[in-house]
Image (cartoon, rainbow, N blue to C red):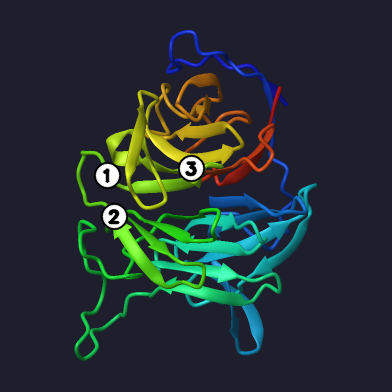
Amino acid sequence: MKRLVLLLAAPLFAQEIHFDAADFLKWPEHIHAGEAAGVATRANGNVLVYTRTGTNATVGGSRVFTHGGSRLFEFDRSGKYVRELGEGVYGFEFAQSVKVDPKDNVWVVDRGSSMVIKFGADGHVAMTLGRKPEAVAEAGRGGGRGGGNGAGVPGDNFNRPTDVAWDSAGNIYVADGYGNARIAKFDANGKFLKSWGTRGAEQGQFNIPLSLAFDSRDNLYVADRGNRRIQVFDREGAFQREIKGHGTPWAICISGSTLFVSNSNEPNTLDDGEIYKMDLEGKVLGVFGRAGKRLGEFGTANQVDCRNPNQLIVGETQNWRVQRVSLK
């Protein structure tokens, strides 16, 4: 379905991008999509969807549907259902994002369990970072979640993390976003190396670092949602520059020299919902979409996959769907 949209919030003279939008996934009858928080594509073109939906459980030898929890599904490039990954995994509680690393491993970031989980090519858990908060206090260990501004937070003691990314050396970066305003860095084996960031609005500070992306020069782009900007750092955390003036960056994705940014602050307003196409300095090359429920409109684009920069996969939490967007 072709959409040509008037964008009320677009910068003056921003080029409208013509595009097709398709709700293309073929969900099995027994599965309800729920909030499509995370989307990613694998090397073979298969699409991963990490949803905030109910879980299956075995009761008396029978499979039953229960409320709560999150699930990770895989579809082929045509949208045909392939399989569920990580069924019953301890850390699946409240989906936030899913990513595929350069070796085609699948990484899930779960905001509810405060964990980052890596699945290997065989579909089994290969690494975990973080730990699900205890329901009760242990001896010598506080129960529940500790709040914090990010300063002095030890290692992978996450508090509602939001995203994960990798530099060219395979080091792992986690946006420890809702509770701790920081970026945590680990080596490829999961050993904690360093972190940076505290809560605030100055350079190197964050107010909900929500989404991460690396460019080919190992610069890390951070969607600093609460401060309505993107901050750019080198891989050691040194501030480089910021990109502002394009609404509230929610989901970001980099493909080559192109940066895609979803503006998803207030999903029910008319001046929100578009996705910007920019160069890496923040110059707007074009813009498409707006808030709404029809195809070609977006209801909180929580994650954007741009492995193919001309055919994006967009996961929406407000509209409970995944759209494939083909740019003209």
Pointer 2 and pointer 3: residues touching (CB < 8 Å)? no
Which quadrant holds residue 88?
bottom right
N-terminal-most mark, 2 or 3: 2
Percent position (x, y) of residue 263? 44, 31
Q: Residues within 10 Å of mark 2 (few under 14, many from 20)?
A: some
Q: Which residue is mark 3?
A: 318
Percent position (x, y) of residue 145? 26, 70
Instruction: Kindly identify the amino acid type of the residue bearing the numbered disc 3.
Output: Gln
Q: Secondary structure beneath disc 2?
A: strand
N-terminal-most mark, 1 or 2: 2
Q: Which mark is residue 264?
A: none
Q: CA distance from mark 1 to mark 2?
A: 8 Å
Q: Secondary structure beneath disc 3?
A: loop
Pointer 3 and pointer 1: residues touching (CB < 8 Å)? no
Q: Secondary structure beneath disc 1?
A: loop
Pointer 1 and pointer 2: residues touching (CB < 8 Å)? yes
**At 42% across and 39% down in the image, what residue appears?**
250
**At 77% across and 54% down in the image, what residue appears?**
44
151 over 129 or under it: above or below = above
N-terminal-most mark, 3 or 1: 1
Q: Which mark is residue 204?
A: 1
213 over 16 or under it: above or below = below
Percent position (x, y) of residue 196? 29, 55
Instruction: Kindly identify the amino acid type of the residue bearing the numbered disc 2.
Output: Trp
294 over 219 or under it: above or below = above
Q: CA distance from mark 2 to mark 3?
A: 32 Å
Q: Is residue 146 left or right of residue 4?
A: left
**At 41% across and 55% down in the image, what residue appears?**
162
**At 20% across and 59% down in the image, what residue appears?**
151
Q: Which mark is residue 196?
A: 2
Instruction: Kindly identify the amino acid type of the residue bearing the numbered disc 1.
Output: Gly
